[in-house]
Amino acid sequence: MPPIPSPLHRLLRFIPTPAHEHLVASILNQALRGQPLRERLGELTGKRIRLCVVDVPLTLTFEIVNGGLQRSSVEPHVTLRGTWHDFLALARRREDPDTLFFQRRLAVEGETETGLHLKNLLDGWDYDVPAHVRAVLPGPLATLTLALGHGARVLHSTSRLRRPGSHRNSRQAGRAPG
């Protein structure tokens, strides 16, 4: 993997850890709105998780409360250690935690049961965009947004179907320029 771009690396190191923790918790709590995973996180209420991003270096500690995260200064129950790219790959679901663990790119320390439970919850999370939209927008606006999103997907898929034999390409192939 290429290294973290230098300006981003400097920015990440410059920002105080509590600000990182607050920002990450806010983003994740927002992303969890409307997701079944939010309710399932209740199974881990009170557990603390530390993420160590070794190549930045950055250490973030969170406690699971009310189906979400809040920053914590108390020792964690489980620590996940990896690189920026590995955590990003996990978040984007481009890598699976088991693969990273067995390749020794992701380390899990502390309460094995808590780490395994968290991993299984994250592995089973299929992000439900419509549920999230309904959770964050008022009813009519959510309905309109989802309809517009569906329409955009239909147009996009239709345009991809026409691309190889698009009107422009058919004209150029069928007639001499005039």
Image: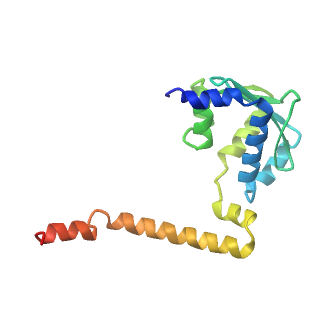
Horizontal and vertical percent for residue 20? Answer: 74, 35
Horizontal and vertical percent for residue 1? Answer: 50, 28
Q: Can see residue 15?
A: yes
Q: Quadrant of the C terminus?
A: bottom left
Q: Can see residue 96?
A: no
Horizontal and vertical percent for residue 113? Answer: 79, 33
Q: Residue at x 84, y 46 (%)?
A: 43
Residue 69 drawn above or below residue 133: above
User: Which residue is nearer to you in this view: 8 or 132?
Assistant: 8
Q: Residue at x 70, y 27 (%)?
A: 14
Residue 117 drawn above or below residue 171: above
User: Which residue is nearer to you in this view: 79 or 18?
Assistant: 18
Answer left or right for 125 relative to 48.
left
Answer left or right for 59 relative to 92.
right
User: Which residue is nearer to you in this view: 72 or 7?
Assistant: 7
Dividing the picture into quadrants, the one containing residue 167 is bottom left
Colour treatment of the image: rainbow
Counting every numbered tag in the picture gives: 0
Q: Residue at x 65, y 44 (%)?
A: 123
Horizontal and vertical percent for residue 172? Answer: 17, 67
Dividing the picture into quadrants, the one containing residue 75 is top right
Residue 78 drawn above or below residue 142: above
Residue 122 drawn above or below residue 160: above
Dividing the picture into quadrants, the one containing residue 133 is bottom right
